[in-house]
Image: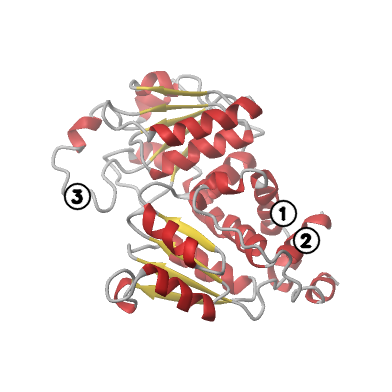
Amino acid sequence: MLRMGLQEILNMRGSDSKIDLLAIDDLSGRLSEIIDWAIRIKNDEEARYDFKPLDGMTVGSIYEKPSTRTRVSFEVGVSRLGGQPLTLLSGDIQLGTSETIADTAAVLSRYMDCITYRCFGHGDVAELANHSTVPVINALSDMHHPCQAAADMMTIVENSDKMNGHVAWVGDGNNVLHDLVLGCAILGYDIIFATPQGFEPDKSVISRALEIAKKTGSKIKGVTDPKVAVEGAGAIYTDVFVSMGEEHMDGKMRSFDGFQVNEELVSDADDDYIFMHCLPAHRGEEVTDGVIDSPNSVVFDQAENRMWAQMSILTLLCNEVAWETYWELR
């Protein structure tokens, strides 16, 4: 019955004005619903197999950077939703070299119903979105990682019944932290981030988060001492200290002495804290085996949730009518 009811409206895609996702606050007004929708379909065995809102659509994914979770989660997620995933690696496309980003966006818009782009410079995905006539999803840039944040907040919401305390970040002030802070602000979670001096998050992103927090009541604080961030935390999150493309930054690792998430550090957190990492993890650097393999770890739930959160986002951006119909059936 679910498939029969929804398939009748799959060609009614909703608003003609496209929505792009370049940072998680682009969807701030609907993030809570997006996450609840993702949790619902994750646990709805009938919809998993019968709900095909992307039937007849093609989603193209451009990768300047190698990927495991992003590529697999998008390809499998698009397929589950009935769409056709098309992956374009850096060697397959002349983006920004022999063809401008604007021209590439215009051409791909004629073939595809949605474009995801995993790139280095955030300006590139912004330019692609500006010239595309179909929705563009930032699958990672140097400034933002909204799909990861959607999965992160989904994981936090799923564990909220046992979380007693704030979200703590320990590590670099990078793209993952940017959207995590924004996501926490949107959903009203308190967050304390600990970064070494000189590696703080972008001030303009924190300003955006603080403006959102004024409305939601979220408390946001930055410190330089990991122990301060972790004390009483309900969730502890870290990421690699040296990101892809930063290998040339000699000496960066030394700046993170004392920032490893290990058994001693987490002993200051709530007993039922959850440990989070966007993966891949450099075991022995930012986290110990004892922490990432502990019962408190939810890192593989996070990885799975990339697919479910992205499925919700893809459906909303590509076929809003189907997204709304499934939402109303809850």
Could you say which disc has been placed on residue 40 in the image? Answer: 1
Nearer the observer, 278 or 198:
198
Return the residue found at the far left.
250
Q: Gap in Å between the C-alphas at discs 3 and 2?
A: 45 Å
- Label 2 neighbourhood size at 10 Å, few (<14), some (14-19), many (20+)? some
Q: Is residue 273 visible?
A: no
Q: Amino acid at mark 3?
A: Glu
Is the residue 287 above or below the residue 233 in the image? Answer: below
**Callout 2: SS:** helix
Nearer the observer, 261 or 24:
24
**Callout 1: SS:** helix
Q: Gap in Å between the C-alphas at discs 3 and 1?
A: 40 Å
**Callout 3: SS:** loop
Q: Residue at x 66, y 51 (%)?
A: 34
Q: Residue at x 55, y 60 (%)?
A: 307
The reply to whether dot 2 and dot 1 touch (C-beta < 8 Å) is yes
Could you say which disc has been placed on residue 296 in the image? Answer: none
Question: Which of marks 1 and 2 precedes in the sequence?
Answer: 1
Q: What x and y, as percent, mark residue 141?
A: 38, 53
Q: What x and y, as percent, mark residue 121?
A: 33, 54
- Judged by depth in the image, the label closer to the viewer, 2 or 1, is 2
Question: Which of marks 1 and 3 precedes in the sequence?
Answer: 1
Could you say which disc has been placed on residue 247 in the image? Answer: 3
Q: Amino acid at mark 1?
A: Arg
Residue underneath mark 2: 326
